[in-house]
Amino acid sequence: MELIQTGGSQGPPSTWTYSVQDAVYGRAMGTNVDPTASPHQWRRPAAWRMAPATHGYAHWDSYGGFVLGWINEIPV
């Protein structure tokens, strides 16, 4: 997945949100996605400032929705 930061702040704690698109076909998967909100599975360390992500991986859940599992946010 390709991620484009659309909102939030560096923190601590960081609150980044993203537009998410398929990295191969460019298909939009979501806008203003909070990767820490359900059903997504990303967990940020609460005490760190994080740089925004640019890519990650996602899978489809049993209901056909996409779920972010990992993104490349890193502590700064």
Image (tube, rainbow, N blue to C red):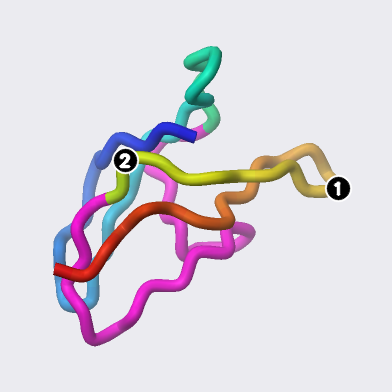
Which of these two is toward me, 62 or 58? 58
Front label number (1 vs 2) = 2
Give the amino acid type for the residue marked by disc 2 in the picture. Thr
Residue projecting furthest to the right: 62
Which of these two is toward me, 15 or 52? 52
Label drawn at residue 62? 1
Q: Distance between the residues labelled 1 and 2?
A: 26 Å
The reply to whether the magenta stretch includes residue 27 is no
Q: Main secondary structure of the magenta part?
A: loop
Give the amino acid type for the residue marked by disc 1 in the picture. Ser
Part of the protein shown in magenta: 30-52
Residue displayed at 47% across by 45% down: 56
Against 43, residue 8 (above or below) is: above
- The picture places residue 33, in percent across and down from the top left corner, at 43, 46
The C terminus appears in which quarter of the rendering?
bottom left
Label drawn at residue 54? 2
Which of these two is toward me, 1 or 37? 1
- The picture places residue 65, in percent across and down from the top left corner, at 71, 41
**SS class of the residue under badge 1?**
loop
